[in-house]
Amino acid sequence: MREKKTWTADDVADHFEEAFRTLRKLPPVKAKGYFNAWPDIARTSREIAAMEPQPMRVWPSAASITRLEQTFDWVLWIEEAERKLIWSRAARVPWKQLSGELGVDRTTAWRKHKLALTKIASRLNV
């Protein structure tokens, strides 16, 4: 029988960082209704060799998308300012920039971040 996992603030922060990375891997949203009816261009091997290589796109797994959806449920448990702070830290925005946006010093911004993560962790441990 599996033991129940006890969530900590660091576990929740790691979960949000993974969710942010998963969001970045998802394909961009495009307006529907527009498409290209032109045929593909037939290129020679010389033209293909001279082209810039296309970046390889890594798609997220189904499990990581499921964990991303879990985090969307979690953010409903905290205030909007705390949501912005948690997502900004998951995106690795520097503390100096965050503290300037919040109008507080770095330690207070860190404390607010830890408090928001602890709120989520305590709710998950119930």
Image: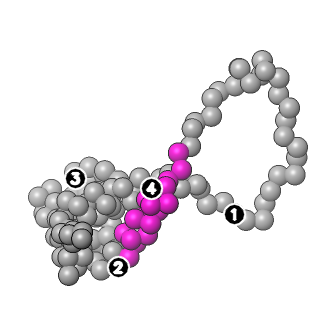
Query: Which circle's residue, 2 or 1, is located before the other in the chain?
Result: 1
| Local crowd size for mark 3, using a 10 Å CA cut-off: few (<14), some (14–19), many (≥20) | some
The dot on residue 95 is: 3
Splitting the image into 4 quarters, where does residue 122 fall?
bottom left
Location of residue 85 in the rendering, given as x and y in whole percent from the top left corner: 28, 64
Task: Using the rendered image of the protein, determine whether residue 102 is visible from the camera's viewpoint.
Answer: no
Q: Secondary structure at mark 3?
A: helix
Left or right of 30 on screen, residue 38: right
Marks 4/2: CA distance? Answer: 19 Å
- Give, as a single range, the part of the protein colored magenta: 58-73
Q: Which residue is mark 2?
A: 76
Q: Which residue is mark 1?
A: 31
Name the residue furthest left.
107
Q: Earlier in the sequence, mark 1 or mark 3?
A: 1
Residue position marked by numbered label 4 in the rendering = 22
Q: Earlier in the sequence, mark 4 or mark 3?
A: 4
Q: Which element carries disc 2, helix, strand or loop?
A: helix
Q: Nearer the viewer, mark 2 or mark 1?
A: 2
Q: Nearer the viewer, mark 3 or mark 2?
A: 2
Spatial separation of the CA atoms under disc 2 and disc 1:
28 Å
On the image, the x and y values in percent for residue 14 come to: 28, 57
Q: Amino acid at mark 1?
A: Ala
Q: Residue at x 71, y 20 (%)?
A: 49
As helix, strand or loop, the secondary structure at mark 4 comes to helix
Q: Nearer the viewer, mark 1 or mark 3?
A: 1
Q: Amino acid at mark 2?
A: Leu
Amino acid type of the residue that numbered disc 4 sits on in the rendered structure: Thr
